[in-house]
Amino acid sequence: MKTITTEGIVQNLFDAEKNVQTLPQFANEYAGLDEDKAYDLQELLVEKKIAEENTTLSGWKLGLTSKAKQQMMGVHEPSYGVLLKNMSLNEGETHSLAPFIHAKLEPELAFVFKKDVVGTYITPAQIIDATDYIIPAFEVIDSRFEAFKFTLLDAIADNSSSSRYILGNQFISPDSIDLRLTGIVFRQNGEVVATSTLAAVMGNPAVAIAWMANKIAKRNQIIRKGEVVLSGAITQAMHISPGDTFSATFDGLGTINANFE
Ligand code: OOG
């Protein structure tokens, strides 16, 4: 039996973010919830945010694309979410943790598109071909669910835990780079907390984005020229505390920094 309504879930997720409060997972109380319905909820939440926060779509994000993240969260497949203009933070600034419930930071490779990506069988090569440049990036994720615990369907409705994103300032064409072998070193307060290569993201971050392009095509959506796509966490996510400084150095692509208070 359905004990919670669609409007109720969307409002609760919206309010939880606004009021910096958690809510319980709902997926088990919502009869007939499947992946498609969870993305319907995400779409309604994003529409509400665009209307009430007076912002616009700036791109997309992949979630749970690496084994490290899937194991950390106990799920077995990726998800995607929507990025909005008001989620973008400037690299050089120190960011207040006040708007976040229990934020974590993840290094990711961002792709910016120079063409619309249209089709229902998009390949990773087409993703690279449509990419203007790639940028080292951080994503701040913040689940609206208690203790950062959820099923995949809860997380999808919660816009895949998206919260903010920070883009670096080196813009590089992906054409001649073997992304799979691009190494990264992730530091928190100067200490190395994780190392990886971009192959951790579904073998190649372009594979993850192709997966998403095909997934959103089924809902009549596309990646558009000018949009940014975060291709998913390359390492485990690190909890952010006030005063933390983070950096992620990507071999040949530069370093992204983030400071919090
Ligand atoms: C879900 C979203 C994770 C990623 O890149 O893996 C994510 C979560 O773990 O909260 O954005």
Image: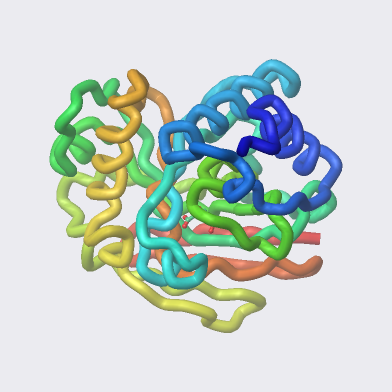
Percent across and percent down for residue 125 are 14, 41
Instruction: Name the residue furthest bottom.
Output: 191
Identify the residue at image location x=33%, y=19%.
220
**Which color scheme is applied?**
rainbow
Above or below 105: residue 62? above
Instruction: From the viewer's perspective, tell me whether residue 155 is left or right of residue 55.
Output: left
Which of 116/68 is in front?
A: 68
Instruction: From the viewer's perspective, tell me whether residue 141 is left or right of residue 96.
Output: left
Q: Can residue 158 be seen from the camera position used here? A: yes
Percent across and percent down for residue 228 are 43, 35
Identify the residue at image location x=32%, y=60%.
201
Quarter that holds the N terminus: top right
Above or below 32: residue 167? below
Above or below 175: residue 242? below
Number of residue marks: 0
Instruction: From the viewer's perspective, tell me whether residue 118 is left or right of residue 161.
Output: left
Above or below 81: residue 7? above
Identify the residue at image location x=65%, y=42%.
89
Percent across and percent down for residue 164 are 63, 44
Which of 76/131 is in front?
A: 76
Quarter that holds the C terminus: bottom right
Identify the residue at image location x=17%, y=33%.
122
Percent across and percent down for residue 70 are 42, 65
Q: Can residue 161 be seen from the camera position used here? A: no
Quadrant location of residue 119? Answer: top left
